[in-house]
Amino acid sequence: MERKSDCERIFAQVANAARALGVTEVEAILAGGEEALTRFANNAIHQNVAARDANLSVRPVIDGRTARATTNRLDAEGIRDVVAEAVAITRLTAPDPDMQPLAAPADYRPAERWFDATARVTPHERALAVAQAIRVVEAAGQTAAGIYSTAGSFIAVLNSRGLSAWHRETMARFSITAMASGGSGWAKASACHHGGLDPVQLAASAAHKAAASQSPRELPPGRYTVILEPAAVLDLAGQMFADFSATAIRDGRSFLNDRIGRKVFGENVDIRDDAYHPLQSGAPFDAEGTPRQTLALVEGGVVKEIAYSRQAAALAGVAPTGHGFPLPNEMGEAPVNVVIAGGDSTVERMVASTERGILVTRLWYIREVDPYQKVFTGMTRDGTFLVEGGRIAAGLRNFRFNQSLIEMLSNVEALSPAVRASGEESADMVVPAMKIRDFHFTEVTRF
């Protein structure tokens, strides 16, 4: 399934099976790939797993009705069965007066994100890299745990109007937590080429934070100047981009209702959605095969553009932007290749310029409190530090925060260059570290 021709061959069977049932309009999404993962804990590798999978998702359109059925059986019988199931469900579905015809073929610029060397990484190669990382943590008298994964994946969108969009890419991820007595540190990175990862450097960073966070002090809750490293920015700011959606705005569930064209954030905040950014990943088309357009989401703090699926665009009388999700769905569309522009500072300079503040490595357990003001709560973890007199003075007990993203992105005092960041709560994005004033910590946690 690594060739576009394989996907087109399967779709020909889908189309034939649909015609045999009297259906001429049909769309298919084929996706899958192979992933291998090496897992380690207690300074030893304890698991190596590999999985290969492919699935076929079929969506007919019949008299304004549509539905979807999915299978991982790609033999002739499995294809006939999933088409029959999709057609049967569609015929039982209520018509959608806003349903669009299937997308016509459209040109898209390929995004070259496949690296044979990454697809061919062996368990032995991953084990060697993991062993080097473990040695760094072990030398510091600490315990390491984490994963190293490599993968190759593909996605194809095809339909009976002749549309045929295909993309494949590789991805490598390395994550490590270093645990010391009374402290922990964490680091994570991802890249389409595994050579872009440096497990030893990531291990050294995690070990340094674990050592520095031992015997943490307790600081009272309150508003502090905070320095969020890129992973923390990703996991918190990443919570808002589903709202940059024409469907969400039309449904009245977006914080951007009545805010398009207004200055919502600080003047130093610029955000775009760019599928072709060199640090991004993913296909250059959406789930209907519509080419992704670059969007200026925020310029100088002003909300400028939002994402439109084909249906949302037709209702608004504008062109689609290529950000739709597989139909049918209630979400509509959203930016998925977010790039928050950076600045010329560094985390080290942010620390040096801070008389009293808090440095945060990462956040977790993030939940929304107020959808319109975009207030979120969550906790810090794996490296929270007191900054005094322009230097890191001590590790800190972790905090719970209660923070509006609107306020946060209006109080940005400094930005580092943007990097590809990996976290736990949001998909990978390209973001900077941020120095922010008056960040609201509400209590000290017991974790």
Image: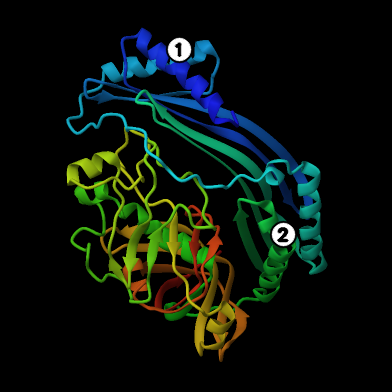
What percent of the width, then of the height, locates residue 225? 45, 81
Give the residue number, with chain letter if any, for mark 2. 199
Q: State which quarter of the image contains the C terminus.
A: bottom right
Residue at image point 34% right, 9% down: 21
Residue at image point 35% right, 67% down: 405
Three-letter amino acid code at the position of disc 1? Arg
Give the residue number, with chain letter if any, for mark 1. 80
Residue at image point 18% right, 42% down: 315
Identify the residue at the far top of this view.
Answer: 20
How packed mark 1 is, by other alpha carbons closer than 10 Å (few <14, some 14-19, many 20 or more), is: some
What percent of the width, then of the height, locates residue 7? 52, 26
Q: Nearer the viewer, residue 398 or 95?
A: 95
- Distance from disc 2 to disc 1, alpha carbons, whole Å, reads 46 Å
What percent of the width, then of the height, locates residue 186? 63, 63
Three-letter amino acid code at the position of disc 2? Pro
N-term-proximal mark, 2 vs 1? 1
* Chosen colour scheme: rainbow
Q: Quadrant of residue 84?
A: top left
Is 258 situated left or right of 387 in this image? Answer: left
Is 169 situated left or right of 375 in this image? Answer: right
What percent of the width, then of the height, locates residue 343? 48, 76
Q: Compared with residue 156, is residue 254 higher up or lower down, i.e. above or below?
A: below
